[in-house]
Image (tube, helix red, strand yellow):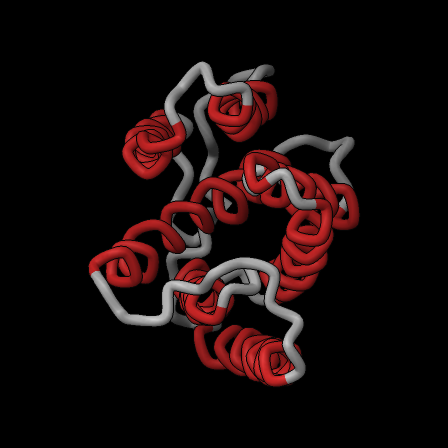
Amino acid sequence: MQKTHPTHYGHLIVAFVAVLPTTLLWLGIIPYSLRFWLLMILSFAMVFYAVWRQFSLADLGIRTDNLRPALKWNMLFTTLLVAAMAIAYSNGFVRFEGQNQLNWFFLFYIVLSSPAQEFIYRSLIFAELKHHRFASPVAIVILSALNFSYLHVFYNDWITLLVTLFMGVIWGIIYHHHPNWLSVSLSHALLGASAIFIGLI
């Protein structure tokens, strides 16, 4: 693994970025309408941070050597959850009004939002915590999943928090064994867009 720029506070910086903006949105200090702009700004800032930390592309899961097994497990998880969502939808377990037509939001969600979230909440958190002796793989998966779930707190819906926590744990486990940013971003995009389309979140 490439030697990184030394810092004793990297995990705190990442935690600050992962938690504070979401809290400000939830409290209404930052308008909810600006959430996607905020995500993009944070993503660019974290790319510069990763460069400053001298993380390699492999450190961040931007690689092709493990793409096939990563895709296999992520697409298996995606297929099972899409099937579960279809069953929930057909049985009337829809709590919100879905965005039942494709529009620019879905393109943004698939091309920009999902990859940006995965870079912050999987790639960067895993890369940062792996450089700290106290962080076991289990701790990294749980911390990543908790931060990812908290990103959805402004829905004010405990079911959404539980579902995203579950998804974060599964993605974290797959990412731990097959760290590949592209495959987990694709899974995230497909599952999230499907859930929004039918109104589950």
Q: Is residue 51 at least partly visible in the picture?
A: no
In the rendered image, residue 198, in percent from the top left (x then y), is placed at 48, 71
Using residue 42 as the reference point, say whether residue 70 is left or right of it.
right
Q: Is residue 121 above or below residue 58?
A: above
Q: Is residue 118 at least partly visible in the picture?
A: yes
Q: In which quarter of the image is the C terminus?
A: bottom right
Using residue 96 as the reference point, say whether residue 193 is left or right of it.
left
Using residue 134 as the reference point, say whether residue 183 is left or right of it.
left
Q: In this view, does 26 lie above or below 155?
A: above
Q: In which quarter of the image is residue 36?
A: top left
Q: Nearer the viewer, residue 122 or 57?
A: 122
Q: Residue sitting at 44 percent across and 24 percent down?
A: 5
Q: Residue sitting at 52 percent across and 73 percent down?
A: 70
In the rendered image, residue 156, in percent from the top left (x then y), is placed at 63, 38
Residue at the far left in the pictured view? 104
Q: Quadrant of residue 157?
A: top right
Q: Residue sitting at 74 percent across and 45 percent down?
A: 142
In the rendered image, residue 102, in percent from the top left (x then y), is placed at 27, 70
Q: Is residue 145 above or below residue 175?
A: above
Q: Residue sitting at 43 percent across and 53 percent down?
A: 58
Q: Which of 115 and 196 is in front in this view?
A: 196
Q: Nearer the viewer, residue 107 or 70?
A: 107
Using residue 22 as the reference point, say whether residue 177 is left or right of it.
right
Count all numbered tags in the image, as a single digit: 0
Q: Quadrant of residue 44?
A: top left
In the rendered image, residue 174, in percent from the top left (x then y), is placed at 63, 66
